[in-house]
Image (cartoon, rainbow, N blue to C red):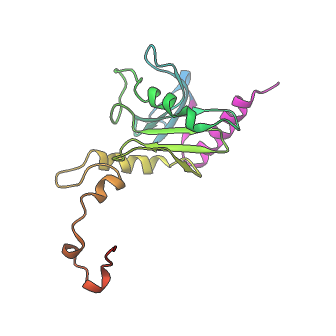
Amino acid sequence: MVTTPEQEARTEIDRLLAAAGWAVQDFKSADIHAARGVALREFQLKEGYGEADYLLYVDAKAAGVIEAKKAGATLTGVEPQSGRYSKGLPESLPAWQRPLPFLYESTGLETHFTNGLDPDPRARTIFAFHRPETLGEWMHYAIPSAGEAPGSFLARVNFMPPLEEAGLWPAQIVQNL
């Protein structure tokens, strides 16, 4: 059987997702309760939004998408596509938030990730897919309990107290001149 370059990329993405703790399933035989993290292949979105190569579920709620491309593809040009997919989840399906916050573009050899919880989201090259537990923890911060700062790590940095109020000694504070 002859495989296309995109099928080869998906095979490698399946392997990488499994190594990161995701249960990779076909959409038609999906069980979003099978594991903490479930990656559904070839998920049909709302009309006009297309088909996501993978829809990521964490704790039985949709959290992100992955757009697969053949090796050698320029992933930067694919970001608008995964961004559109993040907005196309049918309303009847459970989601952590809408649009979905976690966006990946991958060839199986190279992967870009955008954290929509960041104050200024942008794609970054990563070396492995995040584990489901990690995305679940980040969602906990996106929906904070009373008194907690909201959002991603980068968003929470804005809530840090001034250094003088953080209990540091004067010698521990370096001023940028």
Residue 15 is one of the magenta-drawn residues? yes
The reply, left or right, for residue 164 in relation to residue 103 is left
- Residue 107 appears in view: yes
Is 34 in front, or is 20?
20
The image position of residue 172, as x and y in percent, is 31, 82
The image position of residue 32, as x and y in percent, is 46, 32
Q: Identify the residue at horizontal 70%, vertical 37% (top origin).
A: 71
Instruction: Report the span colored magenta.
Output: 1-25
For this orientation, the residue located farthest to the top is 47
Where, quadrant-wise, is the N terminus in this rendering? top right
Q: Identify the residue at horizontal 17%, vertical 51% (top origin).
A: 146
The dominant secondary structure in magenta is: helix
Q: Is residue 86 depicted above or below 107 in this figure?
A: above
The image position of residue 110, as x and y in percent, is 64, 45
Is 120 in front, or is 11?
120
Q: Is residue 169 depicted above or below 21 in this figure?
A: below
Q: Is residue 142 depicted above or below 9 in this figure?
A: below
Where, quadrant-wise, is the C terminus in this rendering? bottom left
The image position of residue 111, as x and y in percent, is 59, 44
Quadrant of res 25: top right
Quadrant of res 176: bottom left
The reply, left or right, for residue 114 in relation to residue 67 is left
Residue 57 is one of the magenta-drawn residues? no
The reply, left or right, for residue 171 in relation to residue 52 is left
Q: Identify the residue at horizontal 44%, vertical 51% (top origin).
A: 134
